[in-house]
Image (tube, rainbow, N blue to C red):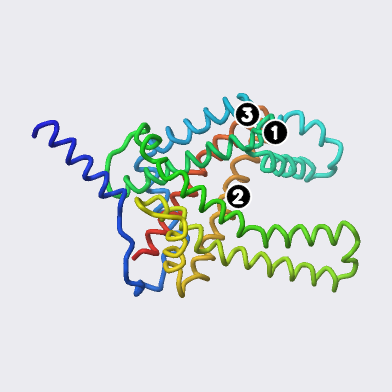
């Protein structure tokens, strides 16, 4: 077959994989796969192209280290352990101190060494996310792609993607406001007795539910908006249709993801903090890069299941 014909055929395959059409009918199956099946499917996709996805997240990590963090792995775990050594006593003191250090590592994730470090990290995370989503769509369609293709061709819907992220940020306001209100009430002795605290807790839960309700659909618009000729508001409407009459089931599967990632991260990172503190920050950094790919793979697989 002539080279030009091969190239034309390859481009047609890529275009076909990148441009699936959303189903017009809403009469989809009501039962979704369990979180275990979704997790297995998402990890299977990543494993089949493990070197490609690893190269994508490593490229993101290296650039982020160079620009946002100045080749610093983040928190100095050894120094933090020495500072916390006198605060905890008893048999569980080392474990308590390690959990505290892990919480500090989470809070400093992506912060960088300067005020603009977080901004740079966010930009690079968005670009890496677009590359991962584009690769997932093509690898699911059995199309061969490269690292160069992922970053060159995957980041074209940057502006619509940022528009969706802005809307998601606005949807987080009720939850943030509820948590802030509760902390302020407790710290300033506004809520003193159990009944008053229960009232603020109920308000926090109610406001958080509003955020979670909105996110249960809008989070999938991140994947819809990467389709050609798609606008943010059109993507939001399509995502809302996808979860229609299944929002609670979808919400439970979305909530599972951060909890599962947190548990896995704790199980992997805590031994490093306790036994090899010098390598703990680097292990945490590498794990956070891998988990970015796992997060998108899981949500993309759930999105595909919603289409069926």
Helix, strand or loop for disc 1: loop
Q: Is residue 122 above or below residue 38?
A: above
- Percent position (x, y) of residue 294? 47, 47
The one of 251 and 213 positioned closer to us in this rendering: 213
Asked which quadrant contains residue 76, the reply is top right
Q: Is residue 259 left or right of residue 240?
A: right
Q: Is residue 67 left or right of residue 56?
A: right
First reached walking from the N terminus: tag 3 or tag 1 = 3
Residue drawn at x 51%, y 44% is 292
The mark lying in front, picked from 3 and 2, is: 3
Give the alpha-carbon distance from disc 2 to disc 1, as whole Å. 26 Å
Helix, strand or loop for disc 3: helix
- Percent position (x, y) of residue 254? 52, 60
Residue drawn at x 55%, y 35% is 286
Q: Quadrant of the C terminus?
A: bottom left
First reached walking from the N terminus: tag 2 or tag 1 = 1
- Dot 1 surroundings within 10 Å: few (below 14), some, or many (20 or more)? few
The residue labelled by disc 1 is 115
Residue 262, numbered circle = 2
Asked which quadrant contains residue 40, the reply is bottom left
The mark lying in front, picked from 2 and 1, is: 1
- Dot 3 surroundings within 10 Å: few (below 14), some, or many (20 or more)? many
Q: Quadrant of the N terminus?
A: top left
The residue labelled by disc 3 is 69
Give the alpha-carbon distance from disc 3 to disc 1, as whole Å. 11 Å
The one of 163 and 43 positioned closer to us in this rendering: 163
């Amino acid at each position: 077959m002539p080279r030009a014909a091969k190239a034309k055929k390859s481009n047609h395959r890529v275009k076909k994989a990148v441009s699936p059409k959303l189903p017009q009918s809403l009469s989809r199956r009501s039962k979704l796969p369990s979180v275990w099946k979704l997790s297995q499917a998402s990890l299977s996709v990543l494993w089949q192209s493990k070197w490609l996805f690893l190269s994508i997240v490593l490229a993101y990590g290296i650039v982020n280290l160079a620009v946002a963090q100045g080749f610093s792995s983040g928190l100095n775990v050894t120094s933090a352990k020495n500072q916390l050594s006198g605060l905890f006593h008893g048999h569980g003191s080392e474990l308590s101190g390690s959990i505290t250090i892990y919480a500090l590592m989470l809070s400093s994730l992506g912060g960088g060494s300067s005020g603009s470090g977080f901004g740079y990290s966010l930009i690079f995370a968005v670009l890496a996310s677009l590359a991962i989503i584009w690769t997932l769509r093509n690898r699911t369609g059995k199309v061969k792609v490269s690292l160069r293709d992922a970053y060159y061709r995957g980041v074209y819907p940057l502006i619509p993607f940022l528009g969706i992220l802005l809307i998601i940020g606005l949807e987080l306001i009720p939850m943030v406001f509820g948590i802030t209100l509760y902390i302020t009430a407790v710290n300033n002795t506004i809520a003193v007795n159990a009944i008053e605290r229960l009232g603020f807790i109920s308000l926090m839960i109610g406001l958080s539910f509003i955020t979670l309700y909105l996110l249960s659909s809008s989070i999938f618009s991140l994947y819809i908006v990467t389709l050609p000729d798609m606008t943010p508001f059109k993507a939001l409407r399509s995502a809302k249709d996808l979860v229609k009459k299944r929002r609670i089931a979808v919400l439970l599967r979305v909530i599972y993801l951060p909890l599962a990632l947190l548990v896995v991260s704790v199980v992997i990172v805590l031994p490093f903090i306790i036994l090899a503190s010098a390598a703990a920050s680097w292990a945490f950094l590498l794990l956070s890069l891998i988990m970015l790919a796992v997060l998108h793979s899981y949500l993309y697989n759930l999105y595909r299941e919603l289409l069926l």
